Image: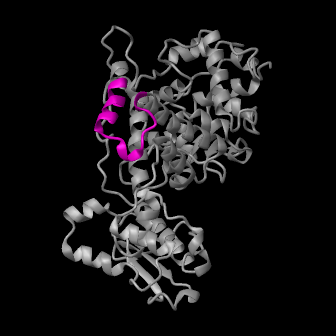
Amino acid sequence: MRSVQRIDQYLRLRGGTWYYVRRVPKSLRHVEDRKFINQSLQTDSLTTARQRRNVCAAADNQRWAEITPQRFDEVPRDATQKDMNQRAEAYGFTYRPAADIAETAELSELIDRLKAVVPSQTPMTPKVQRDTDALLGLAEPTSTTITQAMDLYLSEIALDELSGKSPEQVANYSKVKRRAVGNFVRMNGDMDMREIEREHGRKVYQHWASKVHPTDGSKPMSGNSANRDLGNLRKLYRRYFEHIGEEDRQNPFRNLRFSDAKMSDVKPFSSEWVQTRIFEPNVFEGLNREAALLCFALIETGCRPSELSNILPENICIDADVPHIRIRSTKARQLKSKASIRDVPLVGISLEAMKLARNGFPHYRERGYLLSQSLTKAFKARKLMPSDNHRIYSFRHSFENRMLEAGIDFGLRCTLMGHRNPRPEYGDGGSLTYRRDEMLKIVHPVSEDLLKGFPFKT
């Protein structure tokens, strides 16, 4: 049977509610009373509807495929939890263990489940047996450990999130997800997903609490890593059980997070520091030329390093009436958000740098880790980091601070930074000429001595 091939296949929106709508194959009309399946997914969320559609489609595919007699003996009776959920869903029920049905089910529900089981005169084939097990809660689910759940998450559940990401972005995305699971396993073991309880989530929280709020006099760490780990575990648990059709399970990682000021600990470079230390002539002599130019390009654009290191030549518009760069997604690489799509005028040292980098930065394209390593090493070797709380990303913080202090309009600041503007959207953020003229209010002066060092020696 055909699987889901398009992202919104079999989905219809009616009156604010999504439906699973599918034509029954002609070859199966003799065993199916319906010509069309028209099932409410009971949600107005497209994301949730897609997940529930996947469950319904997989259940129908499996049930229809098994109608062919010669396949009866090919499928083993043991089943995964997802398989049992899908089988029960195909008959209009939710899978429940037999003990749960016996204890809490109304008599009418039990009768309905029994009626749905294939009549007794039908031979008890493996397929009929598995359907019966699913409807009456007789099958025991196979074990899925948290490591296996993460494998499933990255290979199947999170496909929508990974769509459009570059290989580097996929690797970075997967790395932080797997790190969270690795930390959990070190503390609790590689547990079955169904056995994870609140105490195990609290154990992870307490581990991070000892680092974010140490009592031994050591330096507190930022809550960023802690919240990222806890958030990834919380999301994995929720998405895994949604995937197998159990949306109502209570999440053992719920409400476990840190909210303290130490999470925003990246400091901006002061204007004085930029002009006296980073603008010192030949300060980057010996550094890779692309890395040096890219560093200067960051200063007056406020771009994220990944946005510039992956910029394509067609998005570098030096010869336009207002020289600018275009920050865009590509088929191979996503931006952080829709708001990140923007045009940024080039002024000051960033204009001079981009004049010498009209083809972008091919040495660092899809190699963001190498750029970060190279610039961080160069800055530390030349003592260009004022403190341990400064990073290459500090240029972006500096750019935002300078716009704020110069009184530049909030909407324009959001546009240039690639931030979402919570205010109602009017217009397009202003012309390139307007943007450039506003940016000239904060531009660092560029000395002739500094320009004599361009391009830098390799």
Residue 197 found in image quarter: top left
Does residue 52 appear in the picture of this structure?
no
Residue at x-position 72% and y-position 13%: 282
Q: Nearer the viewer, residue 32 or 238?
A: 32
Q: Where are the magenta residues, as a range?
A: 187-207
What percent of the width, then of the height, locates residue 207? Answer: 36, 24
Residue in the picture at 46% in, 43% down: 145
Q: Is residue 69 above or below residue 456?
A: below
Q: Is residue 268 visible?
A: yes
Identify the residue at horizontal 44%, vertical 90% (top origin).
Answer: 33
Q: Position of residue 372 (x, y in %)?
A: 62, 26
Of helix, strand and loop, which mostly describes the magenta segment? helix
| Picture quarter with the N terminus | bottom right
- Vertical position of residue 431 compared to residue 77: above or below: above
- Colour mode of the rendering: one colour
Q: Is residue 204 magenta?
A: yes
Most foreground residue, 204 or 297: 204
Q: Is residue 322 left or right of residue 64?
A: right
Q: Is residue 377 above or below residue 150?
A: above
Residue 109 appears left or right of 302:
left
Front residue of 244/158: it is: 244
- Hey, which quadrant is residue 357 in on the image? top right
- In which quadrant will I find the C terminus? top right
Q: Quadrant of residue 222?
A: top left
